[in-house]
């Protein structure tokens, strides 16, 4: 069983009692738990409950009482606790705590500890639905997610205030399983920044119509999630999709190929690896009518111009700057899959192209599974076979890291 030490920060909300169960769940999974309670949390649950459960002292205040030495010792306690623990989990994270974390306020032990803590931070918000939905809270959550923290969104259901909606603290067993996954994950992308593009682009034809590609964004979101879980800072440039952002990933929403190009070029310099999963529309209407185009009985022809090939442009840019960034493209094909992937590898100056056959129904678009073959600059062809997109994402990253070593592309 794993032995990891975790700080469990308990905020002052009705769900504070569930934190006791979370402490027990975590201990069953081999965690050593150090509980820190805010003053408000102590109004809901007594520190003794946690002390009895964990067998450890519970931190309840910033400056302990007693002699000057005692006060001095407790005034640096937050640094010691921060350094000795692997992960910080805050459950329930109240609206007030999220705000104080987001703004770097340090007016009690937990918020001071948060600033001193350099490891992964997991936040499980719980509050009344209106408070959760309030733009101030949502802004704070966005800030915290953008900082690379892991947010476990609240569940929906009946709340203590008599209303119903999102706001409930997820089941402690689920939070505990999440933490277990986090601390046992691989760390081979720690300190890296990775750019991922995902989803389709939308090219307007008039104010109410657009052309687009079939793409759910699932493969790109799986790539982003896998990279983030392995320690990377991930910038996910995403076209319009119906899926939630993976935890700890910064999403840059875009609509058109031109917007995607601008976002990619803006973030390119800071990224060591670029993964272009997006299904970019190949054509667009250069002059978009300001008003809705009216139906007539006549045949309608559209004259479309090609969109910029973002992948090819990034390939040229990396070559020009000799920047050592690893470039991975995708190729969705219905025939000659490997041959087409090899052609795109060369034409777009990629290090790897992930080819998938989208001719069938079970793999490819809008489904959870894919079947892919990798072709690389090192002239390898690697069959990854059929698996879920999330499993394939890790395998693609494994091969990308091996390839980077082989090509001496470390930067
Ligand atoms: N791509 C891009 N910009 C475009 C078109 C494609 O960056 N305007 C990228 C995609 O993100 C993907 C790769 O190029 O990583 C291959 O996309 P695909 O649509 O398969 O290739 P195309 O070059 O458009 O070729 P074709 O449509 O003829 O197969």
Image (cartoon, rainbow, N blue to C red):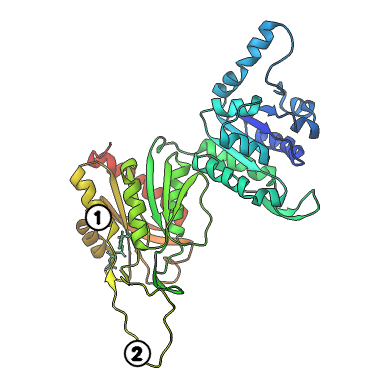
- Height in image: 147 above or below 213? above
Report how far apart the C-alphas of labels 1 and 2 lie in the structure.
36 Å
Q: Quarter of the image containing the C terminus? A: top left
**Mark carried by residue 383:** none
Q: Quadrant of residue 112?
A: top right
- Height in image: 268 above or below 19? below
Q: Locate residue 78, reporting x and y percent.
A: 61, 21
- Of labels 1 and 2, earlier in sequence is 2
Q: Locate residue 321, reporting x and y percent.
A: 20, 43
Front-most of residues 310 and 398? 310
Q: Would residue 216 appear left or right of 51 to someone viewing this image?
A: left
Q: Secondary structure at mark 1?
A: helix
Residue in view at x 38 percent, y 38 percent: 192
Q: Would residue 156 appear left or right of 360 to someone viewing this image?
A: right
**Mark carried by residue 299:** 2
**Residue denoted by label 1:** 313
Front-most of residues 191 and 116? 116
Farthest residue, direction front: 290
The crowding category of the residue bearing disc 1, from other C-alpha atoms within 10 Å (few below 14, some 14 to 19, many at least 20), is some
Q: Is residue 377 visible?
A: no
Front-most of residues 376 and 231? 231
Q: Locate residue 329, reporting x and y percent.
A: 31, 55
Ligand 1 within 8 Å, label 2 CB: no
The crowding category of the residue bearing disc 2, from other C-alpha atoms within 10 Å (few below 14, some 14 to 19, many at least 20), is few
């Amino acid at each position: 069983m794993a032995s990891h030490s975790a700080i469990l920060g308990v905020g002052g909300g009705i769900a504070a009692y569930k934190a006791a169960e979370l402490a027990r769940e975590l201990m069953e999974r081999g965690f050593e738990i150090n509980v820190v309670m805010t003053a408000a949390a102590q109004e809901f649950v007594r520190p003794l409950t946690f002390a009895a459960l964990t067998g450890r002292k519970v931190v309840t205040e910033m400056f302990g009482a007693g002699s000057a030495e005692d006060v001095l010792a407790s005034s640096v306690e937050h640094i010691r606790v921060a350094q000795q623990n692997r992960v910080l989990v805050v459950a329930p994270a109240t609206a007030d705590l999220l705000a104080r974390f987001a703004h770097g306020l340090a007016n009690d032990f937990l918020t001071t500890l948060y600033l001193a803590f350099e490891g992964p931070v997991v936040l499980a918000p719980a509050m009344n639905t209106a408070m959760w939905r309030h733009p101030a809270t949502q802004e704070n959550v966005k800030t915290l997610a953008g900082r690379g923290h892991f947010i476990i969104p609240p569940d929906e259901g009946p709340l203590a205030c008599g209303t119903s909606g999102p706001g409930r603290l997820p089941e402690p067993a689920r939070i505990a399983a999440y933490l277990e996954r986090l601390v046992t994950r691989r760390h081979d992308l720690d300190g890296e920044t990775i750019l991922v593009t995902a989803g389709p682009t939308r090219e307007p034809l008039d104010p109410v119509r657009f052309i687009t590609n079939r793409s759910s964004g699932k493969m790109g979101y799986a790539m982003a999630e896998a990279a983030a879980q392995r320690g990377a800072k991930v910038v996910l440039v995403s076209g319009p999709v119906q899926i939630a952002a993976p935890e700890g990933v910064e999403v840059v929403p875009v609509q058109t190929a031109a917007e995607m190009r601008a976002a990619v070029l803006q973030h390119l310099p800071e990224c060591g690896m670029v993964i272009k999963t997006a299904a970019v529309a190949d054509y667009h209407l250069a002059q978009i009518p300001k008003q809705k185009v009216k139906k007539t009985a006549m045949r309608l022809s559209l004259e479309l111009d090609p969109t910029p090939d973002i992948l090819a442009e990034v390939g040229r840019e990396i070559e020009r700057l000799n920047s050592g960034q690893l470039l991975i493209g995708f190729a969705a094909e219905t025939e000659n899959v490997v041959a087409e992937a090899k052609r795109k590898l060369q034409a777009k100056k990629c290090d790897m192209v992930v080819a998938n056959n989208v001719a069938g129904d079970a793999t490819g678009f809008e489904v959870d599974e894919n079947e892919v073959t990798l072709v690389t600059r090192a002239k390898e062809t690697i069959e990854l076979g059929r698996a879920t997109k999330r499993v394939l994402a890790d395998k693609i990253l494994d091969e990308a890291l091996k390839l980077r070593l082989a090509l001496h592309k470390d930067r």
